[in-house]
Amino acid sequence: MSNMKALVFIEKDRIELEDKPIPDVGPNDALIRVTTTTICGTDVHILKGEYPVATGLTIGHEPVGIIEKLGSEVTGFEEGQRVIAGAISPSGYSNACLCGQWSQDGQDNKHGFKPAGGWRFGNTIDGAQAEYLRVPDARANLSPVPDGLTDEQVLMCPDIMSTGFAGAERANIQIGDTVVIFAQGPIGLCATAGAKLKGATTIIAVDSVPERLAIARQMGADHVIDFSRVDPVTEVMKITDGRGVDVAIEALGRQETFEACLRCLRPGGTLSSLGVYSGDITIPLDAFTAGLGDNRIITSLCPGGKERMRRLMEVISSSRLNLEALVTHRYKLDDIVSAYDLFSHQRDGVLKVAITP
């Protein structure tokens, strides 16, 4: 068999399942047979034309699979081994990597640095919503799946879990901190779980979907706020006795949630932004206290690489966290266009969709 099925971007609001050649592997690559993948909110931004990618590119960046073929220089792995690869697949030797910013691998050339360059699958090279996936720099990016863990147990590790945890980690949450997380989609739920693991003792989750707020409780939220019923900023201030939160995590990518996070912060607090923004955002003068509030605004792109994946799977293996509740729907690759329609319109209580070739 020389061809495979793959979901490709055609143009704005149009994706199609097509036959494409199975990728060849170079000396430092690996070819994995995808056993499970999923759809990300970023993929929906691509579909809507809000994030540009090349016509004909295979989309998707969350692979679980089995090594089909190894490049001649790849050591430490075996064909037939179950693995995951992070949504971010750094080379390990770029300037950004050597500065410790693995997710910002970029392009070290005369044209300068490319933001988010470590995100290659479904962005600059063919991605994971296909029967096969070529993993570049395989020694830096493949991570074996521990025995006893299912595909769905580790499906959140390549992106959603890594991103949500990064929002908590980069905010430098301390034991005893109070944290609010705006939006309890998959990334927000993982940020809630990450805040709990980092030691926050008062965690406030904001959303309007009862099922998501219920899962937020499972992930570690001490308080939940339905923003359709009350003003969330007012409620946060009541919960904190007017003090404000140490950390506010924005996990939606909207002006209103970004601004609400600013308004919830205590003096010297941190706004940790995880959302992918499809338009300009503004910083209100009063919420920013004219720049005199000693606040920090930080952004995070999902960390990748095999060591990051190993650590996340250790969290799952140790039973510190169970994310299986996030997989709410299951589709075959043949039906992935229908899965996109469900996911992009957020019908039927969807959180994450498991796609199986």
Image (spheres, rainbow, N blue to C red):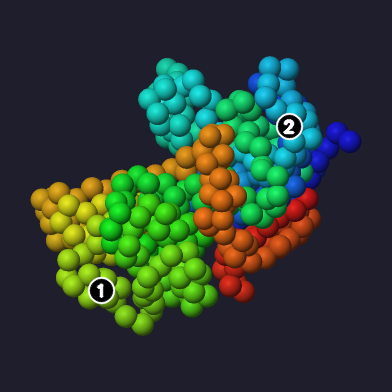
**Figure quadrant of residue 113:** top left
Q: Which mark is residue 253?
A: none
Residue 278 visible (yes or no): no
Q: In terms of image quadrants, where is residue 199?
A: bottom left
Task: Look at mark 2 in the image and give the residue it sits on.
Answer: 31
Report whether residue 228 is seen: yes
Most distant residue in the front direction: 318
Q: Is residue 260 above or below residue 33?
A: below
User: Closest to the observer: 110 or 12?
Assistant: 110
The reply to whether dot 1 and dot 2 touch (C-beta < 8 Å) is no
Name the quadrant containing residue 128.
top right
Quadrant into which the N terminus falls: top right
Q: Report the side of 305 relative to 17 (left or right).
A: left
Secondary structure state at the residue bearing disc 2: strand
Residue 239's tag is: 1
Q: Amino acid at mark 2?
A: Leu
Query: Who is closer to the viewer here, 175 or 118?
Result: 175
Q: Residue at x 45, y 31 (%)?
A: 102
